[in-house]
Image (cartoon, rainbow, N blue to C red):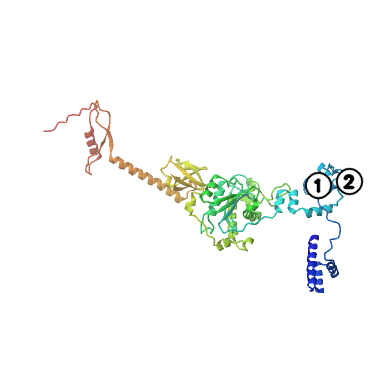
Amino acid sequence: MQGEDASRRAATVARLAQLRDAEQLSAAHVRLAAEGLGVTERTVWRWLSAGTTPEPRGPAPYVLSDADREAYALYRGNVSAVHRARQAVVDGDGTTAGAPVPDFLREGWAGAAPAALRTLQVAFARELTPAEREAWKVGESGRRAKSVYLQRPDEPRGRTWEMDHKQLPILVHPPRGKPICPWMTTIVDDGTRALLGWSLAVTPHAGTVLTAMRMALVHEPELSPFGAVPARVRIDRGLEFAAGTIRDVMAALCVTVHRLPAFTPHRKGKVERVNLTIEQTLISLMPGFTGGPRDASGRLYGPVGDSPAAKRAAETAGTGPMPIEVFVERLAAWARWYNTERPHRMLQRRTPLQAWEEDEAPLHRIETEKLRHLLMAGDERVIGKDGIRFNGFAYVAPEIQGRGGQVVQIRYMPHDDRTIEVYLAGKHLCTATPTGQLTPEQTEAFRQQQRDEAARHGREQRKASRRARRELTPMTGDTPPAESRLVAEKVGRDSSRKALDAALRARSSTSLLGITPIIKKES
């Protein structure tokens, strides 16, 4: 502060000297300068006559030594501990708080003059930046909290994505098991801060990434105006983002992937900010929030157990962890509110949807049908008697009727068991549904396909039987057995099957020795 005042005084004296040399100086100028500096007019006239401002009175400020800085690091930013150790060395004691002062500090402070605690506090506050002080007190997180970062210029809509995984601080009930804190995969548009895609799972994996990517890529006007293929994507070091499936999708869409260095969340700060907004505006207001108040034993207030009694109490009072499907519904409603209703400070109080619609940058989109195969995980299965077995379900569709034992390729969304896509020889065959989840219409369609297939095979078999019948030719001692195709003679419509069989026996009858019986002709 003293240096700042000295600079102001020097600038004022220099300006008054210019006015004096130009013969324009007046008492009004001196009076105005005195009011601005908070001093008397006489003091200003004295400074002007001397040609410069006097040095601040009092002793020179204390300058930290190397030993002082090393002690600050050793005692984790505790200036009081530094003062006690320094004073012990100056007094010749060599111990502080019952412990000896390290040798390198005793050597560094040898012959040093005494310094008051307040003097050291002022010196450390003056010579060390807040980031340096927090680094020794808290660590790297404290240093980063006090650091200043460059801000990227906003890019046009749909050009750059930021993707992130985060374990949400809320307990929810999965379909089976104890309450868990689910993981969320989030995709945010760099230019408009729009929440383009998200997905929830018990643990993060490539499937959750694919699900969120599908929401962000597919353009469905009736559901969301967003959806476009970006030019680049920023991701962290999560192994789920480096999976082969994700890498193949990005390569197929010609998307550049920037995998950021570890422990640099500020380099994808927009998605980190959205995650924090979700926690502050949604999760913190819901039952099961793990960052909420706790009792003396550290247990969250409210029933958080998985016992039947705790579940019943939670359902009755509405204070315990909610089912995960309820949380998904509320998160979906929050995402719509965030994108369409919440004004954003960094968007000039516009909503992400308004910023997206007002941006005229061109978008690159691909038809949904072309993206369907790309945005799913793949596997190979054999069609069995009960359909295609996958993840404990038997998937069926009318198109797989009669294909038992055939090898097909399936594409699926992990943790989404509602349907799978079935491919045969690289071509899409059908969309299969678990047997227990078929609608009455789907069940009837499947059974009708069974009936149609059986009828078709029956017709083909009867047609083949009418065309030919195979019987042995007459055998002799020197000819091997052989088959002969015998075509039935035409008979009238009123001929019976017995007459037809008699005609066939007459043509093919013979003895085992190949002797044809003599038939006497009537005279």
Q: Position of residue 177 (x, y in %)?
A: 60, 44
Residue shown at 60%/61% (left/top)? Answer: 351
Q: Secondary structure at mark 1?
A: helix
The numbered disc on residue 132 is none
Residue shown at 30%/40% (left/top)? Answer: 465
Quadrant position of residue 6: bottom right
Q: Vertical placement of 511 versus 70: above or below?
A: above
Quadrant position of residue 15: bottom right
Q: Position of residue 400 (x, y in %)?
A: 43, 45
Q: Give whichever of 145, 115 is nearer the camera.
A: 115
Q: Secondary structure at mark 2?
A: loop
- Category of crowding for the residue at label 1, using alpha-carbon neighbours closer than 10 angstroms: few (below 14), some (14–19), many (at least 20): some
Residue shown at 38%/47% (left/top)? Answer: 452
The numbered disc on residue 67 is 1
The numbered disc on residue 91 is 2
* Residue type, label 1: Ala
